[in-house]
Image (cartoon, rainbow, N blue to C red):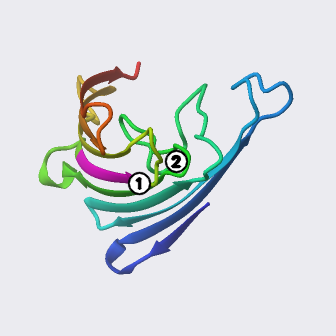
């Protein structure tokens, strides 16, 4: 669900909440055994003109990890590398986005986000993820339809386990 709250000066606060419930049925063909879990989340976006600030929180039940066998996770804290949807996992997201169009850089935007996960039990470890994103989408001219995105993610494992992750992506899209 979403709710929009207009503020003074053309600003806006968007509030959202979500709930996903998963459980096995029938022959348990997806996992081979019965499971039941759910995840809920809340999010607030504060639009301040060119800047956008986001605060979000999700929590997954203790029954099992959320399953995503055919697509991505719908949770507010789904990031570039991690989904923060493991059993007992809680995650908080802070995000700042800026649209540079009003400064003469039409179609250029950037964001930075930080997610801190907690509550995961051994042998798994809690994680943090920091993402940076720079995107340029020309609105007209010869390059109209092109989108260029540079993304970087850093995932830190807390408590040992797997090594930390650095993930760099360059994404080119063209809308014919």
Q: Is residue 133 magenta?
A: no
Residue behind mark 1: 118
The x, y position of residue 154, in whole percent, is 24, 38
Label located before the other in sequence (2 or 1): 2
Residue drawn at 34 percent across, 26 percent down? 145
Q: Is residue 115 magenta?
A: yes
Which SS class for mark 2? loop
- Say which quadrant the C terminus sits in: top left
Pick out the residue farthest to the right.
26
* Residue 75 marker: 2
Q: In the image shown, does 156 or 149 lie closer to the viewer?
A: 156
Q: Is residue 5 left or right of residue 155?
A: right
Residue drawn at 26 percent across, 31 percent down? 163
The x, y position of residue 131, in whole percent, is 26, 43
Task: Identify the magenta region.
Answer: 110-117
Residue drawn at 69 percent across, 26 percent down? 31
- Front: mark 2 or 1: 1
Q: In the image shown, does 30 or 44 lie closer to the viewer?
A: 30
Residue 95, above or below 168: below
Residue 61, above or below 160: below
* Neighbours of disc 2 within 10 Å: few (<14), some (14-19), many (20+): many
């Amino acid at each position: 669900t979403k709710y929009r709250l207009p503020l003074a000066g053309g600003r806006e606060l968007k509030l959202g909440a979500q709930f996903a419930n998963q459980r096995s049925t029938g022959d348990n063909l997806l996992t081979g055994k019965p499971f039941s879990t759910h995840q809920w989340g809340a999010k607030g976006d504060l639009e301040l003109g060119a800047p956008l600030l986001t605060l979000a929180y999700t929590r997954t039940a203790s029954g099992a990890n959320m399953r995503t066998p055919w697509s991505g996770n719908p949770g507010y804290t789904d990031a570039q590398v991690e989904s923060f949807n493991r059993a007992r996992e809680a995650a908080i997201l802070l995000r700042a986005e800026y649209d540079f169009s009003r400064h003469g850089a039409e179609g250029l935007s950037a964001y930075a986000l930080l997610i801190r996960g907690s509550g995961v039990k051994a042998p798994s470890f809690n994680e943090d993820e920091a993402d940076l994103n720079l995107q340029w989408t020309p609105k007209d001219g010869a390059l109209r339809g092109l989108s260029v995105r540079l993304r970087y993610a850093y995932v830190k494992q807390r408590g040992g386990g797997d090594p930390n992750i650095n993930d760099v992506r360059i994404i080119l899209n063209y809308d014919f």
